[in-house]
Amino acid sequence: MSTPDNPPTPRDSASADRLRPEDRHGGQRITFFGALANVALALIKLLAGIFGHSYALVADAIHSFADTASDVIVLLALRISGRGPDENHPYGHARFETLATAGLGLSLVVLGLFMAVNALERSTQPAGPTPGALALSAALLSLTVKEGLYHLTIRIARREGSALLKANAWHHRSDALSSVVAFAGILGTIAGFTMLDAVAAAVIAVMLMKIGWDCIWPSVKEFTDTGLDTKEVAKLERLVDGVFEVERVSSLRTRHFGRYVLVDVDIRVNPRCSVSEGHRIAEAVRERLEAGVHNVSGVTVHVEPDEDTAHSTLTSLPTREALERDIRAALSDLPGGERIENLTLHYIDDAVDAEVVVPIDTAETLCGLERLKERYAAAASRVGMLRRLDVKFR
């Protein structure tokens, strides 16, 4: 038994039931604003780097141009990942955000490698003109603006639980840090340490590659269905165990899906509970998990009887069709046997227990009902794999 009845799908928008309507578009707004800032800063740093004679600042400008391209990717990914399930994507579009995060990380790694090679070539060339106040001012402006963008973006990323926005925030922070390095390199070159400008460019390149890898690795783990860590899984199991009707958790599996976590859990319940009660228990488990962990948004619950019947033994037991046919045939010659109103089967401990409901007017006295129960049980004992028959009169 599983719930929900359809495949588990993350909610159509990021924590839609937890965010105010105006918050759900905060990621797109801050990304668009950041893109405009990146274009302006990139042009300023490029011109200041060229005319101010600082390769570190030119490298920083290239970083900002890469930020602009990544902002476009982020905007598209946020728009697509926010779409709900459709015919081709029954689980929704959340992994487009993961794909964009991986692409963003890869672009940082490639850009870092390119800059590192150029910095190495630059260090072997004769020293050029010394950078001046123009280059220093541009680096300081970039540091101030990019650090501000980092704080604005990371605040919205944490509120919306978006790995992509977090990656973009750290992209801003990397640009701020690279501006610090560029500033230090320019200052050192002015002070007479001519190699520092190239060294600063190389340090920026290494920073870019490290941040890029930090974006790629979590995305790779998600695409390979790596689950939550042991502590987080243990927390989920405690939440499930807290549902009164759950006897025990037999297994719990997790995987990331964009900013969401999907959970598959097998629970053991009283083997004599009804199908509808089992479904209600599964719903209680789902509600508890989604309420207890903010990014759990797709839960499948499999309900199993709390007994140790092996799967191979269970599948060897007769199906309802065969048992009902044999039970009705065995009882057909008894009073009321042709008027059985309900038949309930319990597959427990390598055997089958059955309950039948018979009209109470079948026997006229209480003693007659007790004797009739005995006759029913005796007749049913001839049915293979049937261990016990309980008779109820209504």
Image (spheres, helix red, strand yellow):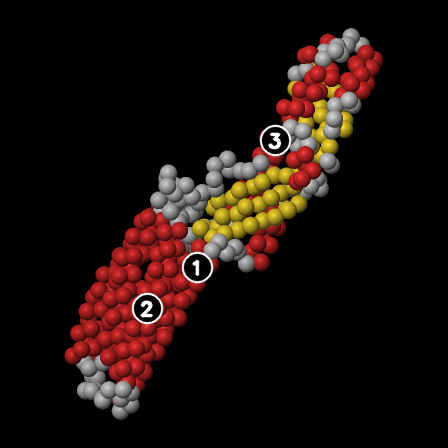
Residue placed under numbered mark 1 in the picture: 220
Identify the residue shown where x is 66% and y is 40%. 311
Q: CA distance from mark 3 to mark 1?
A: 40 Å
Q: Which mark is residue 110?
A: 2
Which x, y percent locates residue 193? 29, 90
The numbered mark, 3 or 1, whose residue comes first in the sequence reads: 1
Q: Which mark is residue 275?
A: 3
Identify the residue shown where x is 37% and y is 66%. 212
**Is disc 2 placed on a helix, strand or loop?**
helix
To which quarter of the image does residue 13 belong? top left
To which quarter of the image does residue 30 belong? bottom left
Identify the residue shown where x is 24% and y is 87%. 125
Q: Residues within 10 Å of mark 1 (few under 14, many from 20)?
A: some
**Is disc 3 placed on a helix, strand or loop?**
helix
Quarter of the picture holding the N terminus: top right
Q: CA distance from mark 2 to mark 1?
A: 17 Å
The numbered mark, 2 or 3, whose residue comes first in the sequence reads: 2
Which x, y percent locates residue 227? 52, 55
